[in-house]
Amino acid sequence: MAEVIGERDGILREELLSFRHFVVETHSLIQKEKNRKFYFCRLPYQNVSHIKEYAGYIRDRFESFVVIGIGGSSLGARMLFESLTETNHNLKKKPKIFFLENVDPEKFKSVLEQIDIKNTCFNVVTKSGSTVETIANFSVILSMLKKELGDNYRENLVFTTDPEKGFLRKLGNQEKIKMFDVPPLVGGRFSVLSPVGLLPAAVAGIDIEELLAGAKKMDLVCSIEEHVEHNPAYLIALSHYIANMRRGKTISVMMPYSEKLSSFVDWYRQLWAESLGKDGLGQTPVKAIGTVDQHSQIQLYREGIRDKIITFLHIEKSDVDYKIPEELPEDISYLSGHSLHEILSKELLGTKAALIKSKVPNITISIDRISSYNIGMLIYLYELATGFSGYLYKINPFDQPAVEEGKNFTYALMGREGYQEKLEEFKELYKEKYKIEVQ
């Protein structure tokens, strides 16, 4: 706030309060849109018994589970897996969980080398049913499954896609493959609390009912609209908007002091960037991990261009910790008796103080521990903050026209029917001016 770091970089309380009427009006609009644009707000209240039942079947039947998807069809599921399971899950438990996202043959090979394809369930996830990377990876896997299993290949597949249209839905209906629905009114980056994220999470042994319970709690917390300071989603949105539009903070850094939350930042980056980066507006989300990036990025954050607002994620308690021995050489004796998690927390405090000294605006979100309930709260918090931010910027946070353009050029380059004009446009646009070849 301005009283701490000054008015050039900090936010005045009066600025927040000046949005009071806007917040009340927008809150009312969001409530009315919960059956349309803000349908993701209804996901915490769904019945997930069918997801849990099928996940139990997969756990009993298969040694490995591979999610084939990209972007919103995989980032949320991977975030849940990496945040809420043991770091060495695949070394200790079954089914092993893998993600085939990019069309990178080296990654593809590495996953194949770790699984027995006959004992692996492949969850193909694409809302449209035609995402290039997903369908390409799936096509290769499908050929392998048919070769290994013959007509029984269907038992090793489960699709998560649009309930009515798209290639994947058509194929699933024809071949009688098990399918789960992506709610039509929920975009990919807002779909983690649908079967897109919940099925892989349940297969991994994550308590998805607790996940949804946390989201419900945050929905209740964010039902307050009279006082912006009491609504964490609107407060996050307004703080970033004011910092961006009135203080020139064009970069939003998220820095968890827990490596298990590394993938949470990957999920946040898509949510914030793809939703709000439109019409010359929005912030660039940047990932940093404490304490690792204290040694690689804090120099820039403190003394570089003053264009950043930083969000710290603080975990108050760790489920595991290690104490430093009492008997240490005198030069490092100050560490005696402390624990690794304690040092991690002190490092966060030290970094915050250094940033405050350099007048860098920063926000801290503290949770008592990493749990399904708390991650559910964080997911809903940032989804709602993103949706609310759309009203602040006067843009649609639920579309991604610039992404579609790149896909269309890809279709043209791959020879897809109906994209000849795009191919001609590509040839006009893409002209290399300088090219250096080193022999």
Image: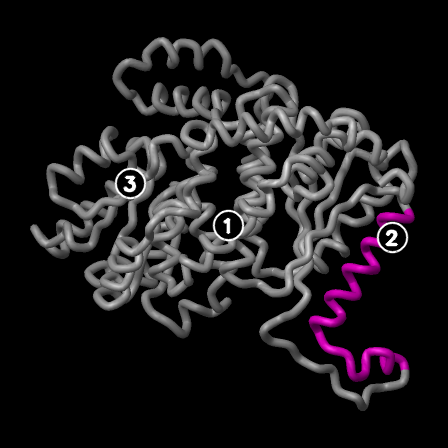
User: Which quarter of the rendered picture does the N terminus lie within?
Assistant: top right
Viewed as shown, does residue 141 lie left or right of 400?
left
**Disc on the earlier residue, 1 or 3:** 3
Q: Which residues are magenta?
A: 331-357
The dominant secondary structure in magenta is: helix
**Disc on the earlier residue, 2 or 3:** 3
Assess whether residue 353 is covered by the magenta stretch: yes
The residue at which mark 2 appears reads as: 354
Q: Within 10 Å of the Cα at label 3, are there few (<14), some (14-19), or many (20+) other Cα atoms?
A: some
Q: Position of residue 155 (x, y in %)?
A: 16, 54
Q: Position of residue 144 (x, y in %)?
A: 19, 50
| Residue 417 can be seen, yes or no | yes
- Of 218 and 90, nearer the camera is 218
User: Which quarter of the rendered picture does the C terminus lie within?
Assistant: top right
Viewed as shown, does residue 253 lie left or right of 195?
right
The kind of residue tagged 1 is: Ala
**Disc on the earlier residue, 1 or 2:** 1
The residue at which mark 1 appears reads as: 215
Is the C-beta separation of discs 1 and 2 under 8 Å? no
